[in-house]
Amino acid sequence: RDPKVIWYEPGQHWVMAVYDDTPAIGHSIAFYSSKNLKDWEHQSYLLGYYECPELYQLPVLDAEGNPTTQSKWVTAAADGAYAIGEFDGKTFKPDHKDKHRVFHGAYYAAQTFSQAPHGRRIQIAWARIDMPDMPFNQTFTFPHELTLRQTADGIRLFAEPVREIETLRKKQHKVSGKVLSEDVPVELNVAGGLLDIRATFELGNASKVGLAFGGEEVAYDVKAAKLDWAPLRAVDGKISIRVLVDRPMLEICGNDGRAYVTKKRANPGPAAIPVIKAFAAGGSAKLVQLEVDELESIWSH
């Protein structure tokens, strides 16, 4: 079910990736090809995947985000775990044994837009978060743009909120170059319940750094190398945290999209958040920069 159909230009045919659980094969993505979208020929299986498959090709960027001459194919299923490899229109061959992961938390069944302008790969997922006292239940994530980048671990998928979020910005607050210690956080006064928070920390000898606001905490555990519950390595002793604060949920982006966490707010609702607190625990750290944009509601924009 939930087939993904794309046009494969080199072979001048359509490709369908669809979940298959044939007992003799096991849970897998089955690949089919067609010249007319009506008559389909089975080509191959990719084992270990479930419903809502995805399949797309992306250019590979270097570690600084600059173009290279390389491109790769990506496949994923509903749980968000993905593989990078080669695809010849019939068979997907992963470059690695174990699947990778960028998405964590209440994040499921993501799909990308085909033929997006300028070759961008934009994805939206199902945020499986209950909505008490609302006339609806659960929601979509904020759209995010996918890229492939070279890292010390090899080529990895990155996800960042689409740049069009800039059209929702109302007022910006910022502070930079502050030392954080156990008893000396940095506070930034803001107003509004819809926020785009971006912070960069030099970890120093702290065991934890993070952000606190409106009864919420988003933190990076230095020893565990985890942002919230997402594995994330520091880069040159620094960590960046971006948080989209919506009324029912938080979307947390670490190190420019190397990790992406979606989770329910501890205190959901329309109440304004008066202050953002950057903190360090177990030692001292440096707040390189903290920027907070107050956002308009998309419904009133």
Image: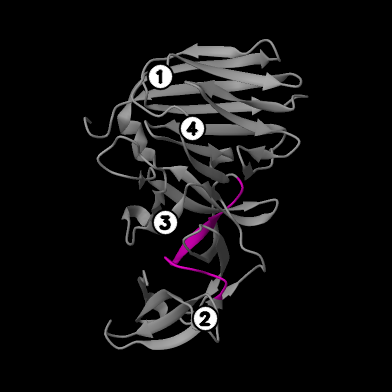
* Circle 2 residue: 45
In three-dimensional space, the C-alpha distance between marks 4 and 3, rounded to whole angstroms, equals: 20 Å
Is residue 19 positioned above or below 133 on the image?
A: below
Q: Which residue is nearer to you in this view: 205 or 148?
A: 205
Earlier-in-chain disc, 2 versus 4: 2
Whether tag 4 and tag 1 are in contact, CB under 8 A, the answer is no
- State which mark lies toward you, 2 or 1: 2
Identify the disc placed on residue 243.
Answer: 4
Residue sitting farthest toward the front:
133
Q: Is residue 271 left or right of residue 260?
A: left
Amino acid type at image mark 3: Ala
Helix, strand or loop under label 1: strand
How many C-alpha atoms fall within 10 Å of the one at disc 3: few (<14), some, or many (≥20)? many
Identify the disc placed on residue 110.
Answer: 3
In three-dimensional space, the C-alpha distance between marks 3 and 2, rounded to whole angstroms, equals: 21 Å
Q: Residue 54 colored magenta?
A: yes
